[in-house]
Image (cartoon, grey):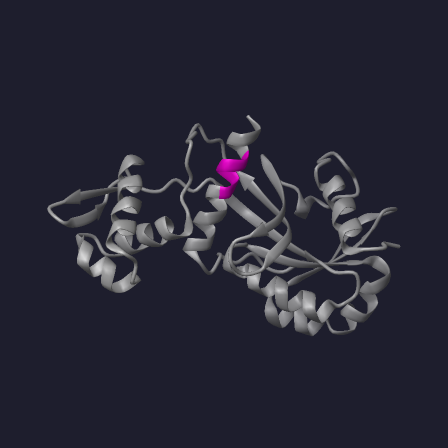
Amino acid sequence: MFNSEKELVDEAMFLLRSPSSEKVPLDLKGENQIVLQEVNLGYGIADIVLTNCTKSTEKRDRYLNQVQIKLLIIINNNPGIALEEIENRTKLRKKAIIDSISFLEELSLVKRTQGNVNPFKSYALYVQNTIAIEAKLKNWKRALKQAYRYKWFSHKPFVCLPSNKVPLAVKNIKEFKKMGVGLIGFCQEQGFQIIYNPRVEDPISDEMTILLNELVLNSLHASS
């Protein structure tokens, strides 16, 4: 059926980038959907990420990195926090903290006053209804463990297997339900078949969600 996982992912990506295709179930489609491949947000590399992106007029030359996002969350959760306290919490060098806060100030996300930092403008989150897919040729156990990690930034994680490898995973569907991970069968002839569709859950990590948002904004800006 497929000679490699790359071949499986490439074929799946081709269909997902054809939103009119009848081989893609409605649950894998969305308005203003962005389709990304090999997304690394710090909890493994997701083979495919689908996310709906509300219209954004925000264009920048630079995008937030993990350190800047971490500092933004700390400041939002601790209004008026002192620079020394940020340094104690993060163990970052003072210069790295000041440089990061300066960039956050450029975006009007925070404001410094006499050594203290306060939230200023709310961070705009454009991504929503994020689906992360881990594709494997046959090892459903490994795929399940990897897909579970994507709950940190996605609303629904899925394992995708070639259709002829699905029966063994179905025999163990309780494991998927227990972990809140969906199961998809895939073949060139019929496309995607959702075997188990998990419930929508909020992503675990605000940090990872913002990082995905920045990745999508960067991707949109690069393609415009």
Classify residue 79 as left or right of residue 158. Answer: left
- Give, as a single range, the part of the protein colored magenta: 215-219
Picture coordinates of residue 86, whole percent (x, y): 24, 58
Q: Which residue is drawn at 63% across and 69% down?
A: 145
Residue furthest to the left in view is 114
Q: Which residue is drawn at 54% across and 61% down?
A: 43
Picture coordinates of residue 154, whole percent (x, y): 54, 54
Q: Residue at x 81, y 71 (%)?
A: 168
Residue 217 highlighted magenta (yes or no) = yes
Q: Kindly report the secondary structure that dominates the magenta region of the rendered protein.
A: helix
Query: Quadrant of the image for the C terminus?
Result: top right
Say whether residue 45 is visible.
Answer: yes
- Quarter of the image for residue 36 reads top right
In-front residue for pair 65/111:
65
In-front residue for pair 70/34:
70
Say whether residue 192 is visible.
Answer: no
